[in-house]
Amino acid sequence: MARLAHKLSQANSYVTADVVEVTEFPELAQRYDISSVPKTVINETVEIVGAVSEGRFVEELLRAQQQAH
């Protein structure tokens, strides 16, 4: 998931991606209710738990963008 997010961020200047090691940042794990990895959070509104296909990831990214407007 991290690799895909970074690829998208390189392809589109409107997308940024950060990867966090939750064992090193327990306050973020608590803030985002991380109980398993990978967990992807988009714009604080859409959460993806587990690995998903590239197509599904893009769908969720678009859904988060729509919710922002």
Image (cartoon, rainbow, N blue to C red):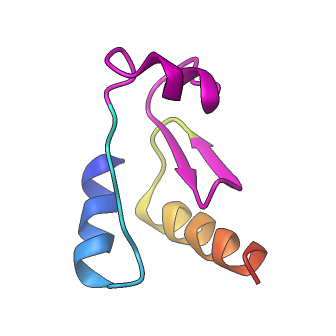
Query: As displayed, is residue 49 above or below residue 41?
Result: above
* Region in magenta: 21-48
Q: Is residue 1 left or right of residue 49?
A: left
Which residue does the image show at 66% across and 68% down from the upper left? 64
Query: As displayed, is residue 18 above or below residue 31?
Result: below
Residue 32: x %, y % from top left: 61, 33
The image quarter in which residue 61 lies: bottom right
Q: Say which of 23 and 11 sits in front.
A: 23
Residue 18: x %, y % from top left: 33, 51
Quadrant position of the C terminus in the picture: bottom right
Report if residue 41 lies within the magenta region.
yes
Q: Is residue 56 left or right of residue 17?
A: right
Query: As displayed, is residue 50 above or below residue 60?
Result: above
Which residue does the image show at 57% across and 24% down from the upper left? 34
Residue 30: x %, y % from top left: 60, 21
Which residue does the image show at 64% across and 77% down from the upper left? 65
Q: List the single residue furthest toward the front.
A: 27
How many discs appear?
0
Q: Say which of 7 and 13 sits in front.
A: 13
Report if residue 67 lies within the magenta region.
no
